[in-house]
């Protein structure tokens, strides 16, 4: 199973959409709140050069934003 | 698939229309490109009656659940085209087509961009359009909010919870926001600075935003070094689908409706930020009301033609 990390903030709607998408498809993920966790914030920026959330790491492949099609492709969801 | 009603847009107007359509026992489908529209991105909503404070996304989810209980279907997809043949509308997404006797456009509006070189390249790398989402990433940093309206002031209030310093850059002589938000802003004057009658002329940065150039100097310099730039300069109504059906627009480019949310095209109704019914009063309560009225008109129309 793929190792998934979502870098998020608590009020971010696209993060909520991404998490709802994972739940709908029974995909396990780890969440890191970049607002409260400075280390996670630096990790997200170094992985993606992005200051916008969500950033999703799927086994080292980085998806920026809630890109349903890209996530579906990487996770093999029809 | 055949429906009585297709609602395009799943923000406050579209979902409210769905709830009313469900209660009218219409077979209805809501198709939305981005669930919850602008409301979902708004963060805490403090003025929706019945709620002291409710998160915008949660409010939209509650409306969606309410519509679902009335057997209204929702679909997350972008409508690619819509065609009309008498009282039969064919709505196509990338993959499928759906038919309905009446339609409601509740497609909202697109965020206005500054239209500057570098803006697109640096989006997410210092340039942002959702302070609720990305504001917290700038904890301890210096940021600027562009725009002189209520959304921008609310953005400054929210961002000041995280940022070290927040500039508010506005084109006009005065900030126009709800008095309660102006009061909050006043209380934040130690960490905020308002720059009036000024525009952002350039966005500078290679891999990430480094600074912006202002249209007139502040403290002797036009350069403003910031970590993040948040753009809140209003929106442009999303009218292309409606226009493809021959729907008339008003002089400001919004879909023109009468007081019952009817457009000039038979069987086509509109509600929410895509219309200018309440002028600049772009609020959930107004969008929900317009959605309810549009669904009522759609129901009455469908009874005659359905």
Image (cartoon, rainbow, N blue to C red):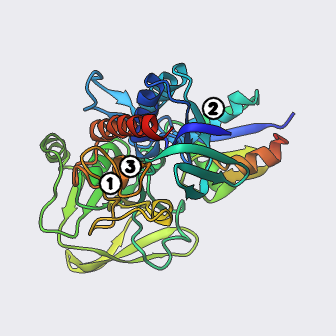
Relative to B31, A78 lies left or right: right
Q: Are marks 1 and 2 in contact (CB under 8 Å)?
A: no
Q: What quarter of the picture does the N terminus of chain B occupy?
A: top right
Q: Secondary structure at mark 2?
A: helix
Viewer-nearest residue: B24 or B113: B24
Horizontal and vertical percent for residue B233?
32, 62
- Nearest to the eye among marks 1 and 3: give it: 3
Q: Please name the residue that numbered disc 1 is placed on.
A: B275
Q: Residue at x 70, y 55 (%)?
A: B94
| Residues indicated by labels 1 and 3 sit on the same polypeptide chain | yes
Relative to B8, A21 lies left or right: right
Q: Residue at x 41, y 28 (%)?
A: B20
Q: Are marks 1 and 3 in contact (CB under 8 Å)?
A: yes
Inter-mark Cα distance, 1 to 3: 7 Å
B23 w.r.t. B255: above or below: above
Horizontal and vertical percent for residue B110?
43, 59
Q: Is residue A31 visible?
A: no
| Residues indicated by labels 1 and 2 sit on the same polypeptide chain | no
Viewer-nearest residue: B230 or B206: B230
Viewer-nearest residue: B155 or B261: B261
Inter-mark Cα distance, 1 to 2: 31 Å
Report the chain holding disc 3. B
Q: Please name the residue that numbered disc 2 is placed on.
A: A20
Q: Which mark is residue B270?
A: 3
Q: Are marks 2 and 3 in contact (CB under 8 Å)?
A: no
- Label 2: how many Cα within 10 Å (few below 14, some 14–19, many 20+): few
Horizontal and vertical percent for residue B295?
40, 36
Mark before the other along the chain sequence, 1 or 3: 3
Report the chain holding disc 2. A
Q: Which mark is residue B168?
A: none
Q: Secondary structure at mark 1?
A: loop
């Amino acid at each position: 199973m793929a190792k998934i990390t979502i870098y998020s903030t608590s009020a971010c709607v696209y993060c909520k959409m991404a998490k709802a998408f994972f739940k709908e498809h029974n995909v396990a993920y780890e969440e890191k709140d970049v607002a409260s966790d400075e280390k996670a914030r630096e990790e997200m920026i170094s992985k993606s050069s992005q200051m916008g959330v969500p950033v999703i790491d799927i086994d080292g492949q980085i998806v920026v934003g809630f890109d349903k099609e890209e996530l579906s492709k990487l996770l093999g969801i029809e | 698939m055949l429906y009585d009603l297709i609602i395009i847009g799943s923000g406050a107007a579209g979902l409210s229309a769905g709830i009313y359509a469900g209660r009218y026992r219409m077979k209805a489908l809501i198709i939305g490109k981005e669930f919850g529209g602008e409301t979902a991105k708004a963060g805490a909503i403090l003025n929706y009656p019945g709620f002291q404070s409710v998160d915008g996304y949660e409010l939209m989810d509650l409306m969606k659940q309410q519509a679902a209980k009335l057997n209204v279907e929702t679909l997350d997809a972008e409508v690619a085209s819509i065609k009309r043949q008498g009282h039969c509308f064919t709505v196509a997404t990338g993959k499928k087509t759906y038919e309905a006797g009446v339609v409601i456009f509740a497609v909202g509006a697109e965020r206005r961009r500054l239209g500057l070189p570098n803006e697109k390249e640096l989006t997410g790398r210092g340039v942002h359009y959702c302070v609720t989402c990305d504001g917290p990433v700038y904890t301890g940093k210096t940021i600027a909010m562009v725009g002189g309206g209520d959304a921008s002031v609310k953005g400054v209030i929210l961002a000041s919870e995280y940022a070290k310093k927040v500039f508010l850059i506005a084109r006009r002589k005065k900030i126009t926001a709800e008095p309660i938000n102006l009061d909050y802003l006043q209380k934040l004057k130690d960490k905020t600075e308002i720059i009036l009658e000024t525009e952002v002329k350039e966005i500078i940065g290679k891999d990430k935003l480094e600074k912006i150039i202002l249209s007139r100097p502040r403290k002797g310099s036009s350069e403003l070094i910031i970590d993040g730039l948040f753009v809140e300069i209003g929106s442009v109504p999303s009218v292309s689908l409606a226009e493809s059906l021959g729907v008339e627009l008003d002089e400001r480019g919004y879909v023109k409706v009468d007081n019952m949310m009817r457009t000039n095209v038979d069987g086509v109704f509109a509600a929410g930020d895509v219309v200018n019914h309440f002028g600049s009063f772009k609020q959930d309560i107004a969008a929900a009301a317009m959605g309810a009225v549009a669904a009522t008109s759609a129901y009455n129309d469908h009874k005659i033609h359905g």
